[in-house]
Amino acid sequence: MQKLIDGVARFKNEVVPQHKALFDQLATGQSPEVLFITCADSRIDPGMITQTQPGDIFVCRNAGNVVPPHGQAIEGTVASIEFATAVLGVKHIVVCGHTDCGAIKGAMAPGNLDAIPRVQDWVDHARAAVRAAEAQSEDGKAELLCATERNVVLQMEHLKSHPAVAARLAANDIDIHGWVYHIGDGDVTAYNADTDTFSSLTQ
């Protein structure tokens, strides 16, 4: 905890004064252009990955970057999606998975989650992605990456079932993007719906 407390002190005393105009503006409201849905994994830092400032992205995090289909759950993720699209008016939604995702590993081996049934129920929302990966991959490492990618695509489809998102899509007023962050080398691959594949954003 001391590391966190020391960090708060440095932030208040050093960082905020250097960006006073920004924080003065943020103190009165927010107008992010992007809703960024990603995993709760401690290795994922959306601001660092995208090199954005406070106020640029509205972040929603949960295990496995899951978006429950409309009508199946009323919880924080669903409320955040509705707020970002209907109130904040974001122009883009990014669903960002990552390599070595524990939630996807759990979805691939549900028996390992027997002791944590709420987690097991949650990653059920990714199970269809695992089945798709099993049909496409021949080895475990490739299957995990494939399942991670298929999960991103699945959650993008789930997003479209939410009324607030569907209304914006019908008006051609919002875009949905699928990304996978590769922890080891910092690469981010993006989904191409035309080819049903992922390729590097930076190539």
Image (cartoon, rainbow, N blue to C red):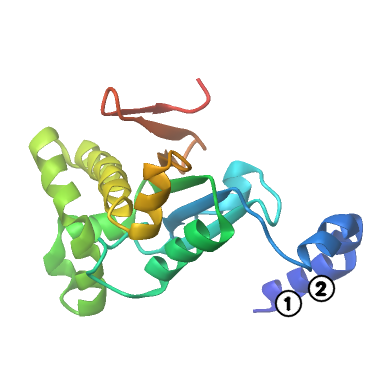
The residue furthest left is 135
Residue lying at 66% horizontally and 55% vertically, measured from the top left: 31
Is residue 126 visible to us here? yes
Horizontally, residue 117 falls left or right of residue 12, namely: left
Q: Where is residue 21 in the image (x, y as percent from the top left)?
A: 89, 56
Q: Where is residue 171 in the image (x, y as percent from the top left)?
A: 42, 42
Task: Give the residue type at disc 1.
Answer: Ile
Which picture quadrant has residue 37?
bottom left
Horizontally, residue 64 falls left or right of residue 118, namely: right
Mark carried by residue 9 = 2
Where 145 sits versus 109, above or below?
above
Is residue 116 visible to us here? no
Residue lying at 42% horizontally and 33% vertically, measured from the top left: 189
Which picture quadrant has residue 20?
bottom right
Task: Give the residue type at disc 2.
Answer: Ala
SS for tag 2?
helix
Residue lying at 23% horizontally and 36% vertically, measured from the top left: 142
SS for tag 1?
helix
Q: Name the residue under label 1.
A: 5
Q: Would you call the spot at circle 2 few (<14 residues within 10 Å), some (14-19), or many (20 or more)?
A: few
- Give whichever of 132, 104 is nearer the camera: 132
Mark carried by residue 22 = none
Contact between marks 1 and 2 (CB within 8 A): the answer is yes
- Give whichever of 108, 158 is nearer the camera: 158
